[in-house]
Amino acid sequence: MKTSARPRWRATGPGPGLGAGMLFLLPAAALFAVFILVPLVQAIGYSFFTWQGAHRIGFAALSNYTALFTKRPYTDEVMPALGHNLLLFAGAMVFQNSVGLVVAALLHRFNRLRRMFQTLYTLPYLVSPIVIGYLWSLLLSPLFGPVNNLLKQVGLGDLAHPWLGDPKTAIWMIALITSWQWLGFPILLFGAAMGGIAPELDEAASIDGATGRQRFFHITLPLLTPAIGTIAILTFIGAMESFPIPFAIGGSTGNPAGSTDVMSLLFYRTAFESGSGGYIGVASAIATLLFLFIFGVALVARRLMDRVERGLVR
Amino acid sequence: MNRKKATAVIALLAASASIALAGCSTSDPTAGSTGAAPSGSAAAPVTLTLWSWRTEDVSAYNDKIFPKFEAENPGIKVDFQAPVVNTEYNQSLTTALAGSDGPDIAMVRAYGGLQGWTRDLLPLDSVVPGLSKIPAAVLQGSKGVDGKIYSVPTFVQTLQMFYNKDIFAQLNLQVPKTWDDFIKVNDTLLAHKITPMALGAKDGWMLPIFADIMGAARYGGPAFEKAVTSGQKTFSDPDYVASLQIVKDMQKYLNETNNVTGVAYTDAQTEFSSGLAAMYPGGTFELTTFKTQNPQINLGTFPVPTPPGSVSSTPLVPAYADGGWAINAKIDPAKKAAAEKLINWMDTPEFGQLAADNVKMFSAVPGVTYSDPVLQQMWADYQAAPAAYLMLVNYRYCNPTADSILAKDTQKMFLGQMTPQQVADDVANGVSTCTLPKF
Amino acid sequence: MTALVAEQAAGRVDGVVRGRRGRQRRGSLGGRIGIQAMLWLYAAYTLMPLLIMVSDSLRTQQQMVMQPLGLPTSPNWGAYSQAWIEGHFGTYIRNSIYITVVSVLLSTACSLLAAYPIARARQWLFKVAESVFLSGLMLPVYLAILPIFFMLDSWGLISNPIGLILVYAALGIPFSIFVLASFFRQLPEELEEAARIDGAGPWRTFWHVLLPLVRPAIATVVVFRFVPVWNDFFFPIVLLRNRDSFTIPLGLTQFFGEHQSNFPMAFAGLTIATIPLVLLFLVATKQIVAGLTAGMGK
């Protein structure tokens, strides 16, 4: 009866007690509160006012929020942008995480060259998004780009396409380029997680006659579920907040024809580039709604993952 | 039960805290001084910092233009900086002016783009008496919606068709004087597998410029501008729709015809300057770029001839004021006199001439002559038939801006997703909620 | 979790008994060659754009316009010297190193400390703290740019590396705690029990027992915080005005705006901006990957 009621200052089980725990927590909490939490709360507050430039000029209550769904250009732009973010998430799960999982599994077998491949695959992650944006824009340019040039030279000229100029392909290009940059991430994380699986489990199964594929699907994959879940959530957050690469490739208006527009570009454009000096209130409303959306989805996903994990360790 | 209540209370507190905290954070940061310039002795040199987005012109200003002022005004030093690139300038200046480390004088945008900063700038009506001699259409770009003047206009940009003289000479082509001639020129170039016109449609902002270059005469330039800004006509007017149809008809003469939305702005510039394209619809602000990319290029300009059915009987050259010089309202009082002196100097033909000669753009200040033959041609064409670049001059005061709608919809038009009528209707709809300021 | 540990323990014993045969790889020769081919093909796809960037920096403008795909026949190194001088890259590199190293150290240290009670302590306070930190992970950081600007401005920290360091350190905390806490959780509780029985307090337990075991996680966290901080251009663009205080991404944006249509210079600048991080990573990768695999062997 007494165990859950009063917190203990000294530890009686594993882990620090309340007192030591709070001391451990303090530096991070202080830094986070001052530089993230307080500004965040203030910024949410901004969404309840009207602005001229960087000056608050009036109280707006919820009108900035309702404007998002009733006034142009937001009615034309909010939903498509959100849709594009979700497309980027889907693209990342397929081109980045699934491929990364397969590659990590393949690399798991080769001890000698594994480090080299891991380094190679992670190299694009190190490159600045500005560099990547410009580089790929040039590579895919219909005029001066080597990609279309190469296709024509090997006789696949029919496939040559204005990759970044066609609304149907532009957003997928961004998904592919983002995956190109981030592939190292799932490879390293899955690789580390796989390294944590005792090889004897695998060996025992193979001695029992299981093929490589059976071993992968029945032993490795289930044990990787926590890692998969973690990566999925991080990918979701990254896709919802994607900014540098769409900005570098499609510009702040999501060219062409708004097909590469994402929520972060919408925020940036609304706050700093719209007509007469910026609509910071509306932009803050956009970012707040985005935050709530991400939060809600991540919460639901976490619950689901917990349930799956509990099911595993039955 | 207790925990759930606690969570609810915390959420409620957080919500009200957000509004409260927003209130006490930054409404008006103390109007402190911008720098640590010591007040007092008139002998101590004052350094004025100037900001602009023209990274291309930094050395021209610091090495050629401002030294003249410094020589005439010992005791004042001018430091011209372009701290960030053009695309990030607005945001940088907004935060700089609202904070405490803004420049003393800043180059600001014109028309609608100026309005976000008017609270941070000094009104110049009484500070610069010479402003009265600037043409009204240009001066409008420096006015706030309250009617006060906040900047000294810098440059006027004109929009016309650039062409490569060498390519024309090779194919025995003349500068077209009628629409039929213009079409013939395009067809000839196409037949010889040279791209007639280079346009970077991927960067949507170029498209309203292209639309005005090709179509201003068709919809009737200044007359239409008056009608539409006073509410007599809307953008759905048949003349405006017809001008957009011309834009669509020109698609077959553009680089990568069906892929034109994949060509970036800088790619189109490179295409023209390297001689792969014969013509380039663009603005005065691109002249320096072409000359830098290819110093040997032999280029000229002409206004596009009037298409059949045009309301205007002569070709038009759309133009706009491209920004102005403004004084930071938070300027250190000790520097204010120096800043006012400098800004008055920037309204003189002397400065205008220096700027025009070194930066290759048209000064907004009257009384300047142009020695570069290309500039002379452009200026003469403009004087003969001036018009306003409709979208930028009049319709950037609200959100959404007309040019952002036109940009996106023209891309869709090139992609075959919208008809000219639909584009015109969409623009009309987008600006219908905007009340234009009365100057 | 304990069921899994028991299973692994049992497997360990069995494995030792059954011998080394299990080490032989199964699979046909064709399959293995196919896999190698795929891996190399993907490596080529990964590297090709970067190689093109380097090779194009050595060609001239005209070459690139006429023949988009080609090798530099006579390498033109001029673009590099021009880019270095006009681009002030030396200053930018120094600033980037300073800001990135200090902020990553700061955020990793604070997060390590915080991750321990979050993973282990039972009190409700720490669950709340964890949720708050994780919500920071979902925060679109650019939302808070204006308040942060005004705050730093009022403390005089604009154009000052300390301002950026503090902001980046704070930004790194959610992700670092996320990863570190999950690693802490995976450590068997028996270790802490044993330490407690031996009389060690929370600090001793943390420093001597747990810390060495999460080294792989620390390496991961450092790498995945180092790179985004190094490459970030959003905060520097608002918080740094003085050219001497610019970091590489900001300097690069500047450089780009001035030289964008000069392809060789642009590519040379891009290459120069990329090299430091690549070198660092190549040097550190041995430690990182060694750390990642060493910690797993137990």
Image (spheres, coloured by chain):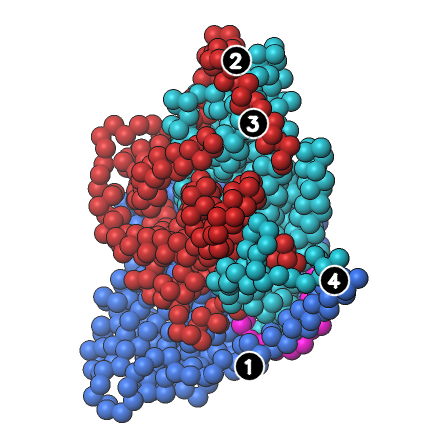
The reply to whether residue B117 is visible in this rendering is: yes
* CA gap, disc 2 and disc 1: 91 Å
The reply to whether residue B288 is visible in this rendering is: no
Amino acid type of the residue that numbered disc 4 sits on in the rendered structure: Arg
In the image, residue B46 sits, relative to residue B297, either above or below, namely: below
Q: Give the structural element (helix, strand or loop) at label 1.
A: loop
Q: Which labelled disc corresponds to residue B147? A: 1
Q: Which chain is blue?
A: B
Of marks 1 and 3, the one in the foreground: 3
Q: Which residue is mark 2?
A: C18
Q: Residue at x 26, y 67 (%)?
A: B62
- Give the letter of the chain under mark 4: B
Q: Residue B144 sits in which quadrant?
A: bottom right
* CA gap, disc 1 and disc 3: 82 Å
Q: Nearer the viewer, residue C156 or B310?
A: C156
Amino acid type of the residue that numbered disc 1 sits on in the rendered structure: Gly
Q: Which chain is cyan?
A: A
Q: Answer whether labels 2 and 4 touch (C-beta < 8 Å).
A: no
Q: Nearer the viewer, residue B423 or B384?
A: B423
* CA gap, disc 4 and disc 3: 40 Å
Amino acid type of the residue that numbered disc 3 sits on in the rendered structure: Ala
Amino acid type of the residue that numbered disc 2 sits on in the rendered structure: Arg
| Disc 2 with disc 4 on a shared chain | no
Colour of chain C in the image: red
Q: Answer whether labels 4 and 3 touch (C-beta < 8 Å).
A: no
Mark with earlier residue (3, 2): 3
In the picture, measured across the screen, residue B428 lies left or right of residue C132, that is right
Q: Which residue is mark 3?
A: C9
Residue A51 in magenta?
no
